[in-house]
Image (cartoon, grey):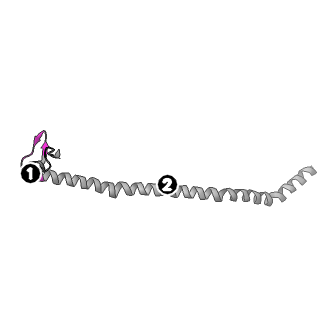
């Protein structure tokens, strides 16, 4: 764990309170190179997580939202255009098939 100690006693922090304390397995790391490596590894992990979120998760969410909005728009247009087309199509089919219906009725009456 990496933490920075704070001095709440006076207004001016002392030199020892500005040091970073790195604890590993319950013991404070004393070697400055190991402290630097712990900080660098922590920074790399934070940068990797930020990169994954920015370049993988957010574009994937954006793509999903865009696809859903596109599907909704297509379905809305299909409903707005499809219902009148079905009504007009049914009317036209009825008008086109009317002579055949009349002929069938005439031939059935004759029997």
Instruction: Name the residue that disc number 2 marks.
Output: 68
First in residue order: circle 2 vs circle 1: 1
> How many marks on residues?
2
Place residue 84 in its image quadrant.
Answer: bottom right
Instruction: Name the residue that disc number 1 marks.
Output: 15
The foreground one among 111 and 33 is 33
Which residue is painted at 18% across and 52% down in the image? 41
Marks 2 and 1 in Cβ contact (< 8 Å): no
Crowding around mark 2 (Cα neighbors within 10 Å: few <14, some 14 to 19, many 20+) is few
Q: State the extent of the magenta-drawn residues as a range.
A: 22-36
Q: Secondary structure at mark 1?
A: loop
Residue 78 picture location, percent across and down: 61, 57
Is residue 3 on the magenta stretch?
Answer: no
Which residue is painted at 64% across and 58% down in the image? 80
Q: Is residue 1 above or below residue 79?
A: above
Q: Is residue 38 left or right of residue 107?
A: left
Residue 51 picture location, percent across and down: 29, 57
Which residue is painted at 41% across and 54% down in the image? 61
The foreground one among 21 and 63 is 21
Residue 54 picture location, percent across and down: 33, 57
Q: Is residue 87 left or right of residue 14?
A: right
Crowding around mark 1 (Cα neighbors within 10 Å: few <14, some 14 to 19, many 20+) is few
Q: Secondary structure at mark 2?
A: helix
Farthest right residue in view:
110
Q: Is residue 55 above or below residue 22?
A: below
Q: Which mark is residue 76?
A: none
Q: Is residue 89 left or right of residue 71?
A: right
Farthest left residue in view:
31
Which residue is painted at 14% across and 45% down in the image? 7
**Real-space Cα separation, disc 2 to disc 1, in angstroms:** 57 Å
The foreground one among 60 and 96 is 60
């Amino acid at each position: 764990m990496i933490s920075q100690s704070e001095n709440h006693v006076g207004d001016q922090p002392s030199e020892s309170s500005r040091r970073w304390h790195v604890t590993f397995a319950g013991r404070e790391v004393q070697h400055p190179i190991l402290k630097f490596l712990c900080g660098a590894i922590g920074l790399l992990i934070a940068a990797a997580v930020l990169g994954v979120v920015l370049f993988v998760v957010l574009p994937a969410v954006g793509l999903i939202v865009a696809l859903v909005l596109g599907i909704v728009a297509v379905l809305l247009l299909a409903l707005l255009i499809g219902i009148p087309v079905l009504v007009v199509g049914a009317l036209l089919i009825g008008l086109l098939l009317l002579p055949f219906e009349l002929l069938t009725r005439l031939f059935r009456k004759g029997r």
